[in-house]
């Protein structure tokens, strides 16, 4: 079993290995968040912030390696955004739940709706495009990249908000509000940008249906 797993691991390129490692790091990150208010885990919040930053750096690193090594693959095109979306999903939801919030700095619900709604919209759009065109479309947009970057700054800022307040009263709260607003605006812009890209792709690729309801040129020969 372990030999097979090792063989499969060696068959992957480095960008894909990093993406898989980032996916595996989500589990300990979630555990740390869920135990940050437990006195038995005094450093859980700091460890969660550090782990999140590490995952953000790995996201940048696998993208750079894929470009420099010309190692872009279909697997990587799926794993990379999957890791990003899973990380955002667990981060924003857990930090908005009173039981797991950073003391005195709970993430606002409207940010959760914006972040999760954006990803759900993209996933549904991805499926619709595939069903309509029989092709996959994985294309990042500038607002999408900016939204991901803003969330990578927002989450550790929320986790470290009490420390910012200790430096200057109210700084952590103010910083959270600014970042939450930026993330929400960028999520809306991301939805609009991906919708435009998807619609243009569908218009270019979609073939008209014939009288039998089948795509022209796709019917079996008589």
Image (cartoon, helix red, strand yellow):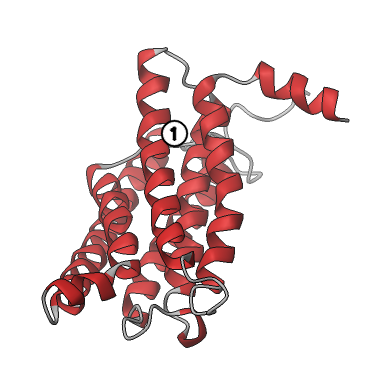
Snapshot quadrant of residue 40: bottom right
Instruction: Pick whichever, 147 or 59, lies toward us.
Output: 59
Q: Does any portion of residue 221 appear in the rendered image?
A: no
In this rendering, the answer to whether 54 lies above or below 181 is: above
Image position of 111 with respect to 48: above or below: below
**Quarter-wise, where is residue 113 in the image?**
bottom left
Farthest right residue?
1
Q: Quadrant of residue 205?
A: top left
Horizontally, residue 131 falls left or right of residue 191, namely right
Say which quadrant the N terminus sits in: top right
Q: Residue at x 35, y 25 (%)?
A: 64
List the residue tagged with mark 1: 205
Position in image of residue 187 (x %, y %): 29, 61
Label 1 neighbour load within 10 Å: few <14, some 14-19, many 20+: some
Question: Residue 163: image x %, image y %?
Answer: 25, 71
How many marks do you count on the picture?
1
Relative to 121, say whether 12 is above or below: above
Nearer the observer, 6 or 183: 6
On the image, the x and y values in percent for residue 7 come to: 76, 19
- In screen coordinates, is 101 left or right of 141? right
Q: Quadrant where the C terminus lies?
A: top right
Q: Measuring 24% from the left and 49% from the top, which residue is drawn there?
A: 146
Say what secondary structure mark 1 lies in: helix
Is residue 18 visible in this depiction of the protein?
yes
């Amino acid at each position: 079993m372990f030999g097979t797993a090792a063989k499969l691991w060696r068959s992957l390129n480095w960008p894909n290995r990093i993406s898989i490692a980032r996916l595996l790091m989500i589990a300990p990150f979630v555990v740390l968040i869920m135990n940050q208010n437990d006195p038995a885990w005094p450093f859980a919040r700091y460890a969660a912030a550090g782990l999140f930053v590490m995952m953000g750096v790995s996201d940048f690193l696998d993208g750079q390696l894929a470009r420099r090594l010309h190692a872009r693959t279909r697997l990587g095109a799926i794993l990379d955004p999957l890791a990003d979306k899973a990380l955002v999903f667990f981060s924003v939801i857990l930090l908005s739940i009173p039981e797991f919030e950073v003391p005195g700095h709970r993430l606002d619900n409207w940010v959760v709706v914006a972040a999760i709604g954006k990803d759900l919209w993209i996933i549904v759009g991805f499926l619709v495009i595939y069903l309509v065109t029989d092709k996959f479309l994985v294309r990042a947009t500038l607002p999408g990249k900016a939204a991901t970057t803003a969330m990578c700054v927002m989450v550790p800022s929320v986790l470290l908000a009490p420390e910012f307040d200790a430096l200057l009263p109210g700084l952590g709260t103010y910083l959270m509000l600014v970042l939450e607003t930026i993330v929400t605006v960028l999520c809306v812009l991301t939805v609009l940008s991906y919708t435009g890209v998807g619609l243009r792709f569908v218009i270019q690729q979609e073939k008209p249906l014939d009288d039998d309801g089948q795509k022209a040129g796709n019917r079996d020969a008589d």
